[in-house]
Image (cartoon, rainbow, N blue to C red):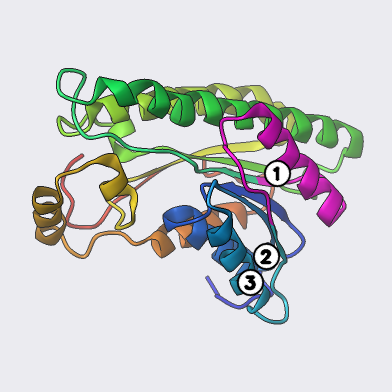
């Protein structure tokens, strides 16, 4: 797929949560490079401001970027993100990347119980709130516009390979990704008749801030990454997101596992 700015995503209005680093940041840049306008969300406003400045420097054909900082689990913040997409770009968002999430090392027996509620609130409850709000708006907009299959509408949910194959090293986290994967599939079935695509993307090991924030042992996890190097980079996921959302509206790629070639499991 070409990396020129004037790509098949020109004119799309995208929302990306967890956009201050890693996969979310890479996706915002790649979508904007291909012509989509993006509303970026995370708690670290200064990083989002830097991201939007970088988007503005992409040149002719690239989309614009707008910042909505705040907690992606908060219903008010979610509504603000959706409202800003509509007010800034003149129509409802038609590409929503449900990316904000957090990891946790360990199993139900060994992980930090004090982190369980915070992780599940973000990975499952907050993600579900965004899926619900975006899905309702897309459904209503599709019914008003009656423009399928001329216009594509996408909700993409970031799962994980450990949300398909339980890992003994992060099974409590994996459980949250099993849950959001099931929710995404349920919503796909509900919205499919309206011409709205709901897709689950399950990356395996991606090199980012995620591992440190999740509390993974840097020595052991670093050795694992080196043993299967090269591992995925955020840009690899961003290219996949652009490929999926660039398909004609009648084509849906709804469940994707992406791994480093040398990663056997999970």
Taking the image as shown, residue 222 lies to the left or right of residue 127, namely left
| 179 magenta-colored | no
Q: For label 2, count other residues whose C-alpha is less than 10 Å away and answer few (under 14), some (14-19) or many (20+).
A: some
Residue 204 visible in this rendered orientation of the protein: no
Q: Secondary structure at mark 2?
A: loop
Whole-Å distance between the Cαs marked 2 and 1?
13 Å
Q: For label 1, count other residues whose C-alpha is less than 10 Å away and answer few (under 14), some (14-19) or many (20+).
A: many
Residue 166 visible in this rendered orientation of the protein: yes
Circle 3 is placed at which residue position? 53
Q: Are marks 1 and 3 in contact (CB under 8 Å)?
A: no
Q: In this rendering, which labeled residue sits more in front, label 3 or label 2?
A: 3
| 77 magenta-colored | yes
Residue occupying image coordinates x 19% and y 24%: 107
- Mark with earlier residue (3, 2): 2
Whole-Å distance between the Cαs marked 1 and 3?
27 Å
Q: Secondary structure at mark 1?
A: loop
Q: Which residues are magenta?
A: 67-95
Residue occupying image coordinates x 78% and y 47%: 84
Taking the image as shown, residue 51 lies to the left or right of residue 261, namely right
The location of residue 175, given as percent across then percent down, is 32, 24
Taking the image as shown, residue 44 lies to the left or right of residue 209, namely right
- Mark with earlier residue (2, 1): 2
The location of residue 229, given as percent across then percent down, is 17, 63
Q: Is residue 7 above or below residue 228?
A: below
Whole-Å distance between the Cαs marked 3 and 2?
23 Å
Circle 1 is placed at which residue position? 153
Circle 2 is placed at which residue position? 8
The location of residue 248, given as percent across then percent down, is 67, 53
């Amino acid at each position: 797929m070409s990396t020129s700015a004037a790509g098949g995503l020109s004119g799309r209005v995208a929302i990306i949560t967890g956009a201050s680093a890693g996969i979310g940041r890479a996706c915002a840049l790649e979508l904007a490079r291909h012509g989509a306008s993006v509303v970026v969300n995370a708690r670290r406003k200064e990083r989002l401001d830097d991201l939007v400045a970088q988007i503005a420097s992409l040149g002719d054909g690239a989309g614009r970027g707008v910042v909505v900082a705040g907690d992606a689990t908060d219903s008010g913040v979610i509504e603000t993100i959706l409202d800003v997409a509509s007010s800034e770009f003149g129509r409802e968002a038609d590409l929503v990347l449900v990316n904000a999430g957090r990891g946790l090392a360990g199993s139900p027996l060994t992980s930090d119980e004090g982190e369980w509620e915070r992780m599940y609130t973000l990975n499952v409850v907050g993600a579900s709130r965004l899926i619900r709000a975006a899905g309702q708006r897309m459904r209503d907009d599709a019914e008003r516009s009656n423009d399928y299959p001329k216009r594509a509408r996408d909700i993409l949910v970031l799962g994980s390979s450990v949300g398909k194959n339980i890992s003994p090293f992060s099974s409590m986290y994996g459980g949250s990704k099993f849950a959001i994967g099931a929710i995404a599939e349920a919503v796909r079935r509900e919205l499919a008749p309206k011409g709205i695509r709901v897709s689950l993307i399950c990356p395996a090991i991606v090199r980012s801030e995620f591992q440190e924030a999740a509390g993974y042992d840097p020595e052991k996890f670093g050795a694992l990454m080196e043993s299967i190097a090269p591992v995925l980079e955020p840009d690899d996921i961003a290219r996949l997101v652009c490929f999926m959302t660039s398909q004609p509206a009648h084509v849906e790629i709804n469940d994707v596992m992406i791994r480093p070639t040398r990663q056997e499991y999970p």
